[in-house]
Image (tube, rainbow, N blue to C red):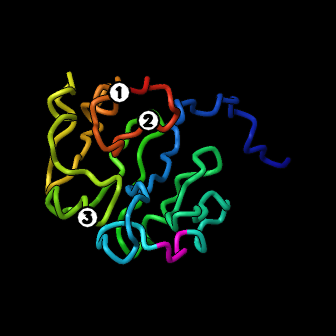
Amino acid sequence: MAYDNNKHKTARPAATRPRKPRPVAVVMCNGGCDLQGCKQGCIGCGTCVGVCRKNAIHINERGVAVVDASACIGCGLCARSCEQGIIQLVEREFTITARCSNTEKGSDARLVCDNSCVACGACERACPAGAIHVTDNHAVIDWSHCISCGMCATKCPRNVIRDAFGIVAER
């Protein structure tokens, strides 16, 4: 008589755990700069476009990489390949981003970019959660504290801080 290995096994439902949404890539550059002048912005080299397996990134008319969040799978290849180190992976729920990586002082940053952060601190003062700080002369968001209220975006005089879905009321 053959032994049946499955005789005493009972079917168990597969472990169910909530799936964590995949992050999305965000380019921390507004594209308002003279490509030769801004040393920290997107240089439009296209490396990120070349490594993206989902065609979720393109170079816009200003020479800056733009991510299509609906196509991005959050694999991180673009972030790892970015020569400037300005592509970050953020959780999809964090819709507010400070899209400037320029570390020049305000007056110098203004000379090379129409949309650079000038470290004025308006965003910092407006944030009710204390989630945004000016570090190295540009706004940096601490997403562990951000409540996505958009107050920082509405107060930013240079339109550096943006809401990914455009739901924050404009000034």
Residue ID for mark 2: 163
- Type of the residue with mark 1: Gly
Q: Earlier in the sequence, mark 3 or mark 1?
A: 3
Q: Which residues are magenta?
A: 44-48
What quarter of the picture does the C terminus occupy? top left
Secondary structure mostly seen in magenta is loop
Q: Residues within 10 Å of mark 2 (few under 14, many from 20)?
A: some
Residue contact at pointers 3 and 2, CB within 8 angstroms: no
Q: Rounded to the nearest whole Å, what is the CA distance between mark 2 and mark 1?
A: 7 Å
- Residue 150's disc number: 1
- Type of the residue with mark 3: Leu
Kindly identify the residue that appears in the image at 68 percent across and 29 percent down.
10
Asked if residue 134 is positioned above or below residue 81 in the image, the reply reads above
- Say which quarter of the image contains residue 129: top left
The x, y position of residue 110, in whole percent, is: 25, 58
Residue ID for mark 3: 111
The x, y position of residue 38, in whole percent, is: 31, 70
Q: Residues within 10 Å of mark 1 (few under 14, many from 20)?
A: many
Kindly identify the residue that appears in the image at 33 percent across and 61 percent down.
113
Q: Rounded to the nearest whole Å, what is the CA distance between mark 3 and mark 1?
A: 27 Å
The x, y position of residue 13, in whole percent, is: 65, 28
Element on which disc 1 rests: loop
The x, y position of residue 98, in whole percent, is: 33, 45
Q: Earlier in the sequence, mark 3 or mark 2?
A: 3
Q: Earlier in the sequence, mark 2 or mark 1?
A: 1
Q: Viewer-proximal residue, 90 or 66? A: 66
Number of marks in the rendered image: 3
Q: Viewer-proximal residue, 59 or 116? A: 116
Residue contact at pointers 2 and 1, CB within 8 angstroms: yes
Q: Rounded to the nearest whole Å, what is the CA distance between mark 3 and mark 2?
A: 25 Å
Asked if residue 133 is positioned above or below residue 153 in the image, the reply reads below
Element on which disc 2 rests: strand
